[in-house]
Image (tube, grey):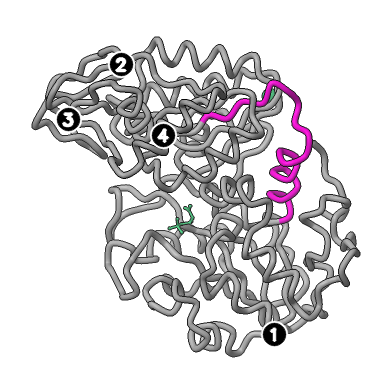
Amino acid sequence: MTTSAYNPLLRGLPLLGDLPPLEGASVLVRVDFNVPLRPCRGESSEVTDDFRIRSALPTLNYLLEHGARVTACTHLGRPKGAPDPRWDMGPVRDRLAELAPQVQLLENLRFDAGETTNDPAFVEKLINGHDAYVNDAFGVCHRTHASVVGPPSQLPSAAGFLLEREIDALGGLLGSPKRPFVAVVGGAKVADKLGVLRALLDRVDTLVVGGGMAFTFLAAAGHDVGASLVDHARLDDCAALLASGKSIMLPSDIVALEEGAEYGCDCTGGETRTVGRDVPDGWTGLDIGPATVEAYAEVVAKAGTVLWNGPMGVFEDARFASGTTGVAMAMAECAGYTVVGGGDSAAAIDALGFEDRIDFISTGGGASLALLEHGDLPGLAALRGAANAPRAGASSTRHRSGR
Ligand code: 3PG
Ligand code: MG
């Protein structure tokens, strides 16, 4: 699972050393500074986890050290194509100013509708005045958004160090990971993850399911889920996965909150209770229970390779954080090769101080899953199409050793 110049994903991908001379050049860098904020969002909020910002520093510093003027751009949250004070870039800009004061940061890309629609006019606006483009935004490489796929056809382009590292590590999971290979997948939305769950089931020995998405599986298996989150349109898909004969683990107990009580960031009040696989009427399941944590930890402990993506519960509410914390601990204790993807899972690892005990922490959530599902990403394909990309079959090695 080491860096390999022969990683097929790196073939034809332009790296930083493939850029024209940087001295005096203006470089546009797409980063993924979509970071968690507290209070959950808003003008006066602050960055609670700067992992994604710190992860881009090697590339930003490399460009600065080579004499470039550096302009970074990112999205934050999911504003709907117009300025939205909840996703003001202020807190991110403040943190970046502390870490890399010479780097300029553009306004939230998603304040312009042209970003998500990949409008050529928006691409033109973005690249205007720049001599080169660098993509170091692994977390958004699965999106065909203007800032991700547009500039490489217009400017000399390269993957940054962060992007290269991600491809190295995740490419290894596509090769021949050490077995047993276990994937622990959580998060709220099962619809977003069905494709990757199917793809993972072909690769892993055991698929472990937690988080809000577990309730659609439990409902599909005939359990009562009370007022828990269920995607009724996906019940058949989940039932089909459960009937596939592959090894899928679902929670055996649930931490639930009584009817009418609120949950989430800074919420308190209402009774919480650990119940079995059936959630009482009106109650909402918000975390996996202690028996489930134990069972999941045991599977993780025995794994040769583990991929964890997505929280096991509503962990921003301290009452429903134990499942996510428990899985984070199991990951830290696992002797196998451990990979964590997704902002929430990475934040849980960070909050526990376990960063050094995980083999690779991806800055991408959806992107890491999309890479495993499809074997490539639109952002990478766009870079391979840049005029300065190494010719097909060649693999750039010029900057692989110098960092
Ligand atoms: C992420 O946090 O997963 C990335 O920044 C992508 O964000 P998106 O899912 O809103 O495109
Ligand atoms: Mg390990």
Circle 4: is it few (<14), some (14-19), or many (20+) Cα within 10 Å?
Answer: many
- Tell me the residue that label 4 is attached to: 238
- Residue found at the very far left of the displayed protein: 260
Q: Quadrant of residue 83?
A: bottom left
Q: Position of residue 305 (x, y in %)?
A: 68, 27
- Tell me the residue that label 2 is attached to: 277
Secondary element at tag 1: loop
Q: Position of residue 353 (x, y in %)?
A: 54, 29
Between 9 and 157, the one lying in front of the other is: 9
Vertical order, 340 against 250 (above or below): below
- Name which of mark 1 and mark 4 comes first in the sequence: 1
Estimate the spatial distance between the alpha carbons at disc 2 and disc 4, rounded to whole Å. Answer: 16 Å
Circle 3: is it few (<14), some (14-19), or many (20+) Cα within 10 Å?
Answer: few
Vertical order, 125 against 162 (above or below): below
75 left or right of 87?
right
- The residue lying at 68 percent from left, 49 percent from top is 166
- Name which of mark 3 and mark 2 comes first in the sequence: 3
- Name which of mark 1 and mark 3 comes first in the sequence: 1
Vertical order, 170 against 394 (above or below): above
What amino acid type is highlighted by mark number 2?
A: Arg
- Tell me the residue that label 1 is attached to: 131
Foreground mark, 2 or 1, reads: 2
Q: Position of residue 26 (x, y in %)?
A: 67, 82
What amino acid type is highlighted by mark number 4?
A: Cys
What amino acid type is highlighted by mark number 1?
A: Asp
What amino acid type is highlighted by mark number 3?
A: Thr
365 left or right of 262?
right
Between 229 and 323, the one lying in front of the other is: 229
- Tell me the residue that label 3 is attached to: 268
268 left or right of 183?
left
- The residue lying at 80 percent from left, 75 percent from top is 19
